[in-house]
Amino acid sequence: MKNCKVIVITGTSRGIGLGMVKYFLSQGHIVVGCGRSKIKNNLENYFYSEIDITDEKQVCKWIKKIQRTHNRIDVLVSNAGLVKSSLLMTVTPTSILSSFIETHILGTYIVCREVSKVMIRQKYGRIITISSLSVPLLLEGTSAYTATKSAIVDMTKVLAKELAPTGITCNIINPGLIETDATNFFSSDWKKMLLEKQTIKSTFEIEELCYIINFFINSKSDCITGQVISMGLVT
Amino acid sequence: MITYENAINLIQESCDSLHRGGLIDSKVIIDKETHVLGGKSIFDSIGFVTLFAEIEDSIMEKTNSDVFLILDDINEFDIDTPFLSAGVIASHIVEITKNID
């Protein structure tokens, strides 16, 4: 396929990540995913590896392997994240904060850094990081989660500035409420509360998130970098 | 394993490859004193990253092993006064490849 891209997505064992994998495969792209779980993968043109993105050496090896196998990385969607129950800051254990820092900040940082090295040599690439609506909404009970998702936004913006001379763009998406197996974890009251805070008060489909990614990765979006799109929210 | 002289040559080859690929503007002659990072470095930050990646690939080609150049692992590297010469990198290459057949 002429416009076939090599798309790397982290956190693809379930939820939004798995949904994105299926969407981009249906568009004729090659998708390389990773997650902490072992999965059965029967999808054509989908290459899954069991990776802990907070382990620097594992990530380095994984990215080198992708480069050797596919010769390039056109797009990175840094999606891996943790979903844990909401607690007010006063009762949030330090272990919860540490796990968010590890996965959201450290993991995203390492993956973006290693993929950037490949993209710099290509003089082309698109990096999209997935943050959260909890950042602009400052949701109560998400202090640890939101602090680390907020870090992803600023990290991506700095990276966008650093990589601008190399033809690589970096952008951020704050997904609205998308029903997946991962969000089944939340109570209906919590989902209702989130919907009430969104400007567009409906749940979204994974395809709608993928349309935004398609906009960022389009070859005509060279001038779009360091931007944040919040689904269903006026900020 | 890779000897010190081979490591210097490998850095030279990596620079030549970047020059051929248009990733650095001018041809660079490497010796052990050449500043690669900080000081009077001939590379900007993007050029330095690209050089490291190129060197990793060259080592991989020569040794058939995954080898990664990580700044934290280079003993002589001090983050507060970031400076690296080709000689320091060459010594590090020797160190990390010494157990590879």
Image (tube, coloured by chain):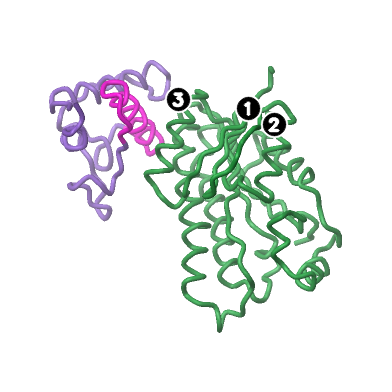
Chain colours: A green, B purple
| In the depicted structure, whether residue A88 falls above or below residue A135 | below
Helix, strand or loop for disc 2: helix
Q: Nearer the viewer, residue A69 or A131?
A: A69
Q: Which chain does tag 3 point to?
A: A
Whether residue B86 appears in this view of the structure is no
At 47% from the left and 75% from the top, the residue drawn is A94
Q: Name the residue that disc number 3 marks.
A: A68
Helix, strand or loop for disc 3: helix
Tell me where residue B100 sits by quadrant.
top left
Name the N-terminal-most of marks 1 and 2: 2
Whether residue A30 appears in this view of the structure is yes
Instruction: State the separation of the CA atoms marked 3 and 2.
Output: 21 Å
Q: Magenta region: which residues?
A: B43-67
At 65% from the left and 37% from the top, the residue drawn is A223
Q: Which chain does tag 2 point to?
A: A
| In the depicted structure, whether residue A31 falls above or below residue A135 | above
Name the N-terminal-most of marks 3 and 1: 1
Q: Nearer the viewer, residue A49 or A53?
A: A49
Q: Which chain does tag 1 point to?
A: A
Discs 3, 1: same chain = yes
Q: Main secondary structure of the magenta part?
A: helix
Tell me where residue A186 sits by quadrant.
bottom right
At 17% from the left and 37% from the top, the residue drawn is B95
**Residue A228, horizontal then vertical, whole percent:** 67, 52
Discs 1, 2: same chain = yes
Instruction: State the separation of the CA atoms marked 3 and 1.
Output: 16 Å
- In the displayed orientation, state which residue is furthest to the right: A201
Q: Name the residue that disc number 1 marks.
A: A45
Classify the position of the N terminus of chain B by image quarter: top left
